[in-house]
Image (tube, rainbow, N blue to C red):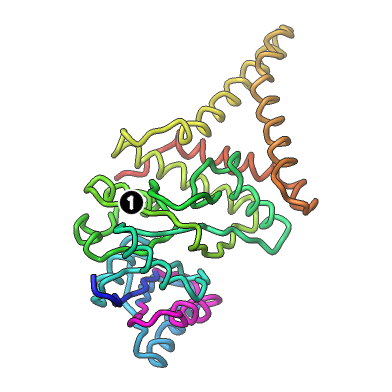
Amino acid sequence: MRDTPTVVVVMPVVNEERHLRSSVARALDQDYSGRIDVVLAVGPSRDRTREVADELAREDERVHVVDNPTGRTPAGLNRAIAAVDSDVVVRVDGHAMVPRDYVRIGVETLVRTGADNVGGIMAAEGETDTERAVATAMRSRFGVGDASFHVGGEEGPALTVYLGCFRRSALARVGGYDESMVRAQDWEMNLRIRETGGIVWFTPELAVAYRPRSTLRALARQYFAYGRWRREVVRRHPETVSVRYLAAPVTVAAIGIGGVVAITGAATGRGALVAAGLAPIAVYALGTVIASVTSGTHDWRALIRLPGVFATMHGAWGIGFLRGGVAG
């Protein structure tokens, strides 16, 4: 890699009219001395995303626009990566506001560590009461496990990271993003990088603000899809299954079975059966309360919503994992 690698920032965008101009401005306004281009892979949108993207391309020759007819993230990423040659590929979401030192730190870390992909923290931040509760849950080990890109930690090799700053040679080596992976495509990509001898590197110096879902219904849809696609990753790569990924589906199954047992006990007048059935429900409920109280948040409006947020995330993810069935 040359001393000052050329960089392309790739952004798959759908319905991003509201944030796109600011996001592109942040991607271009970097304290990096090398060349930076931005490629917008625009999918079918219900707003003026395409018009805004075209305006940005006319205003700045570093901005390029490509079509992404499917609107799917991995397809858009592959089209954007192919559009402009560079040494380094930085993957950014269309509503992400990257800090000014993001590209510089990413490139410096690639060079320093020899890694194939460098990424950091999904810094969840909310504005509404529900968003703040979800953001707190997404920074909690009880909520999302111990993945460093959620909860932070020391820099070093990782299974996956948020977004990513890639060597183009690594993307070419593994054949780009798997376009059949509608979700979990970043995790799956990092798996293939690691399987081919590459290093995925986490550094807490890289942090990108993330705006969580604003309603429990939207959060449930999001985590249901996450669970289904994690099941697909496990189907394709069974060696990746872990206790952390099984925790939510096992909890959902235990609560479901417990509910049936409790109802059966109540119908037959067997109190011991009712107690046994309610036990897993009570244990989980107590766990959500303890995790909420010890979450570190001093925002009482978010705090009182946390048990419901935890239950929504775990329940939807677990049901999605048990449901599976995304391959086709």
Taking the spot 56% from the left edge, 29% from the top edge, the residue there is 251
Q: In which quarter of the image is the C terminus?
A: top left
Q: In which quarter of the image is residue 31?
A: bottom left
**Could you tell me how many numbered marks the image carries?**
1
Taking the spot 57% from the left edge, 47% from the top edge, the residue there is 220
- Residue under label 1, please give it: 190
Taking the spot 53% from the left edge, 79% from the top edge, the residue there is 22
Taking the spot 51% from the left edge, 31% from the top edge, the residue there is 247
Q: Is disc 1 placed on a helix, strand or loop?
A: helix
Relative to 24, residue 92 above or below = above
Q: Give the range drawn in magenta.
A: 12-38
Relative to 280, residue 4 above or below = below
In reply to whether residue 33 is colored magenta, the answer given is yes
Choose between 61 and 2: the one closer to the eye: 2
**Of the residues shown, which amino acid type is indicated by label 1?**
Asn
Residue at the farthest bottom position: 59
Choose between 212 and 209: the one closer to the eye: 209
In reply to whether residue 56 is colored magenta, the answer given is no
Q: Quadrant of residue 172?
A: bottom left
